[in-house]
Amino acid sequence: MNNRQKFEQDLAALLSRLTLGVEKEVENKLNMLKDWLLNLQRENVVKINHSVMELVCAKHLILRDYEVQVEYPLNEVLTCDLYSRKGYGNLIIEIETGFIPPEHALFPLTYTSARLASKIIRYSSFAGKFALGMPPHYILPFPSALSKPPRRRTSEEIKAIKKLCDRYYQNPPVTEEEIQNARIQEIYIIDVDQAKVQEIDPEGYMKRALHKGLVFDYPAS
């Protein structure tokens, strides 16, 4: 079995679980998203561990009356993982699996913190609401200042976040104004095994992680 066949088989198996007992309209919407992911996989754009999380999260949103698209282009540069609309508002979700490129193996937490900060800063400007999605076994090490409302960020925190992002992302660099205005409203904990999603606010998430001794805050180094 080649990679394409395995990808199709895995998505079909997941869809059989996701569509069990749902209304036909929900099933049709999930199948359309699955077919779109299959097309993207043929172009080598998506990977299975990322795609299954997108579909589990998509069902969660569809059941809450959102219209959902996956791998949705926001501009010529940025494509978001999930773009959803309900009424006049939109919600963008970026999914993090915890993958570290080999070239960043010596500073994985610092790199991941910069990547998450950059995502929050860049993507939230397109969103009425912005969220990060993650598996239950992963801790999101984004700078804690970004979990706070923008008005509560200090100039020192903003400068530290810019220094961190500039270490890895300078094409184009994020601005201090973008950092000041960035906002993340939710964390989506996506359990593929159980095909369930838990929502938690960023400050609550940080407090929970801190209580367990699992916060790694790298504002700049």
Image (tube, helix red, strand yellow):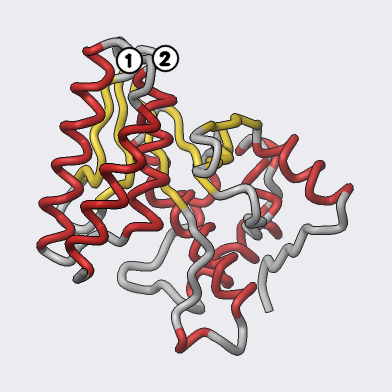
Q: Quadrant of the N terminus?
A: bottom left
Q: Position of residue 172 (x, y in %)?
A: 32, 67
**Neighbour tally class for label 2: few under 14, some 14-19, many 20 plus, Cα within 10 Å:** few
Q: Secondary structure at mark 1?
A: strand
**What is the spatial separation of the Cα atoms under label 2 and label 1, in whole angstroms?**
9 Å
Q: Position of residue 130 (x, y in %)?
A: 46, 36
Check disc 2 and report the residue beneath it. Answer: 64
Q: Secondary structure at mark 2?
A: loop
State the residue in front, 145 or 155.
145
Inspect the image, locate mark 2, and give the three-letter code of the amino acid beneath it: Arg
State the residue in front, 18 or 134.
18
State the residue in front, 216 or 151.
216
What residue sits 75% from the left and 35% below the top? 204
**Neighbour tally class for label 1: few under 14, some 14-19, many 20 plus, Cα within 10 Å:** some
Occupied quadrant, residue 92: top left
Q: Position of residue 164 (x, y in %)?
A: 57, 71
Label 2 with label 1: CB-CB less than 8 Å: yes
Check disc 1 and report the residue beneath it. Answer: 86
Q: Nearer the viewer, mark 2 or mark 1?
A: 2
What residue sits 48% from the left and 73% below the top? 166
What residue sits 17% from the left and 66% below the top? 44
Q: Is residue 153 left or right of residue 166?
A: right
Q: Quadrant of the C terminus?
A: bottom right
Inspect the image, locate mark 1, and give the three-letter code of the amino acid beneath it: Lys
Q: Which mark is residue 139?
A: none
Residue 26 to residue 80: above or below? above
Occupied quadrant, residue 112: bottom right
Q: Position of residue 200 (x, y in %)?
A: 65, 31
